[in-house]
Image (cartoon, grey):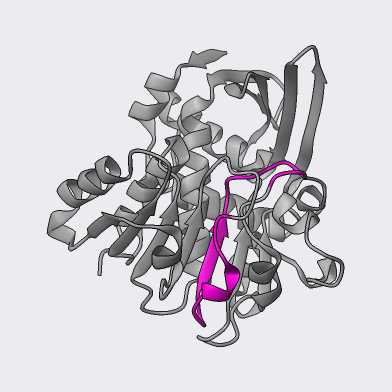
Amino acid sequence: MIHLTDQQIDELIGFDDAIPALDIAFRTFARGDAAVQRRVRTETGGVKLSTLGAVVPELGVAGAKVYSTIAGRFNFSIILFSTDDGRPLATLEANAITRLRTAATTVLALRALAKPGARTVALFGTGVQGRAHAHALAAFTSLREFRIVGLEGTAELADDLNRTYAEHGVQACPACAGDAVEGADVVVTATRATGALFDGSLLSPGATIAAIGSSLPYTRELDDTTVSRASRIVVELREQAREEAGDLIQTAPGTFAWDDVVELGAVLEDPATARRDDSDIVLYKAVGIGLQDVALAARAYARATGHAAAPGVAPTLA
């Protein structure tokens, strides 16, 4: 059994590895060839322990992510087992994987859900996930105009994007919430907000929203108007979203129907299940599931041990 640190994982895999690995994992789950363990949280005295996991025989692994939360700070670890003989394969620090898998899944979702020709994104959040999303979207989607909204660091993040992706035509600038959302093709929320970040009536027809900041039933980033305007709502795992997705749980009765919510894997297998028309507003609501963590841990383990890994993907740069 080996142990991989966050630094080693950053050297072993990046977004070009994570995006295809997650595509395989979600499709495998949609076909019924993988199982996901929903998150369980245990808390006392201000200390929270959370666990979530997955069994993915196609990747040869079963695993669980375990993490602590103290005063709003997280520390993540993953353990992998072989699905061939059950032996433990690796332990991994998982702060890097958590950062990577969330943004990579958003790229995967937006490739499937955003209307053709989407170019403009309103990005809420300048923290770890906000920055990860900014770089992933700039490098691996056709989005080129970035409107950055945050409490601090908006100018710094915009300057970073402008420098790093200048040759690809990326233009980024700080913006207020209303100006950022109005006319945007894509809206990404990656914050620790506990209430709605913008007025959903400002969304343009055809907009796609990716809400990834909240994974607690009592916090939200979206208002009822945003949810009610969505022609389709997509989640990673419906059962877990019903327990954790505050953006959906907190809406008024009748705002949407859980029976109409579809899972990301099903959309990847059949894109027609999500967007019917370019004018549809589509919502992707993420809370994070163990399938993502186990898939990327498996990829890092394969790279570290020299096992064959699926090829990466080249950046999508229009």
Task: Say which of 167 and 215 sits in front.
Answer: 215
Residue 116 image position (x, y, % from top left): 41, 79
**Residue 18, located in which quarter of the rendered image?**
top left
The reply to whether residue 179 is in sight is: yes
Residue range of the region highlighted in magenta in the rendering: 197-219
Q: Is residue 241 above or below residue 100?
A: below
Q: Is residue 4 left or right of residue 136?
A: right
In this view, the residue farthest toward the left is 167
Is 8 covered by the magenta stretch? no
- Give how far across and how far down residue 46 sits, in percent: 74, 15
Residue 268 found in image quarter: bottom right
Residue at position x 61%, y 52% in the image: 221
Magenta span includes 198 = yes
Q: Residue at x 19, y 46 (%)?
A: 164
Quadrant location of the C terminus? bottom left
Where's residue 271, x and y in %?
58, 75
Residue at x 71%, y 34% (from the top left corner): 53
Is most of the magenta stretch helix, strand or loop? loop
Give the answer, above or below, for where 178 lies relative to 23.
below
